[in-house]
Image: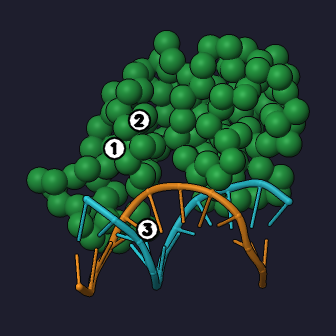
Chain colours: A green, B cyan, C orange
Amino acid sequence: MAYWLMKSEPDTFSISDLARLEQAPWDGVRNYQARNFMREMRPGDEFLFYHSSCQPPGAAGIGRIISEPYPDHTAIDPDSPYHDPKATAEKLPWTAVDVAFVKKFPRLLTLSDMRSLNGLEGLALLQRGSRLSVMPVTDQQWQVLLAVAS
DNA sequence: GCCAACGTTGGC
DNA sequence: GCCAACGTTGGC
């Protein structure tokens, strides 16, 4: 079983939204590196649900991958905010997975908190200039994060 | 295939 | 609102 971190702007989709829905598609990823990580996801994998572009940014809880990766059809929906005019049903380069709610942390594990922890040096989130929205988390990094967040 | 210009991300 | 960093686009 693998671990991941995925970013979402809470104004658009937050950990509380996932808690209410219980499960939801994670779609709209339009970056090839992030997409490639999504294609490695398998049911049972868990991810940190990270709130970005908010004050303060940080990890809000945990979700679980509950499907195999599948084509992200929002890319060919002209009414979707994630519509990709270059994508077609025959050539659909983007990938989605279904996710389920696992838990919301008692308090946000902020980006600032994470920067102060030992053992997270390799985490892409903390790399200077990194904008990756889907990234792997190692077992060791997961243990460090969960020890503080739970 | 290079690279300048542009658009986006996302913390601050 | 600013801006650094990065990815993408498009002219050549």
Label 1, residues with CA under 10 Å away: few <14, some 14-19, many ≥20: many
Q: Quadrant of the C terminus of chain A?
A: top right
* Residue A76 in sight here: yes
x, y percentage for residue A40? 38, 27
Label 2 SS: helix
Front position in the image: A138 or A11 = A138
Q: Are marks 2 and 1 in contact (CB under 8 Å)?
A: yes
Front position in the image: A82 or B2 = B2
Q: Is residue A78 above or below residue A122?
A: below
In the rendered image, which residue does mark 3 sit on?
A81
Farthest left residue in view = A90
Rounded to the nearest angstrom, the CA distance separating label 2 from label 1 is 7 Å
Residue pictured at 72% horizontal, 28% vertical: A121
Q: Is residue A17 above or below residue A62?
A: below
In the rendered image, which residue does mark 2 sit on?
A38
Residue pictured at 34% horizontal, 57% vertical: A74
Q: Are marks 3 and 2 in contact (CB under 8 Å)?
A: no
Residue pictured at 60% horizontal, 19% vertical: A138
Picture disc at residue A95: 1
Type of amino acid at the residue the image marks with label 3: Pro
Query: Of discs 3 and 2, which sits in the foreground?
Result: 2
Picture disc at residue A79: none
Residue pictured at 81% horizontal, 17% vertical: A147
First in residue order: circle 3 vs circle 2: 2
Label 3, residues with CA under 10 Å away: few <14, some 14-19, many ≥20: few
Label 3 SS: loop
Q: Is residue A87 left or right of residue A83?
A: left
Type of amino acid at the residue the image marks with label 2: Met
Rounded to the nearest angstrom, the CA distance separating label 3 from label 2 is 20 Å
x, y percentage for residue A105? 79, 31
Type of amino acid at the residue the image marks with label 1: Thr
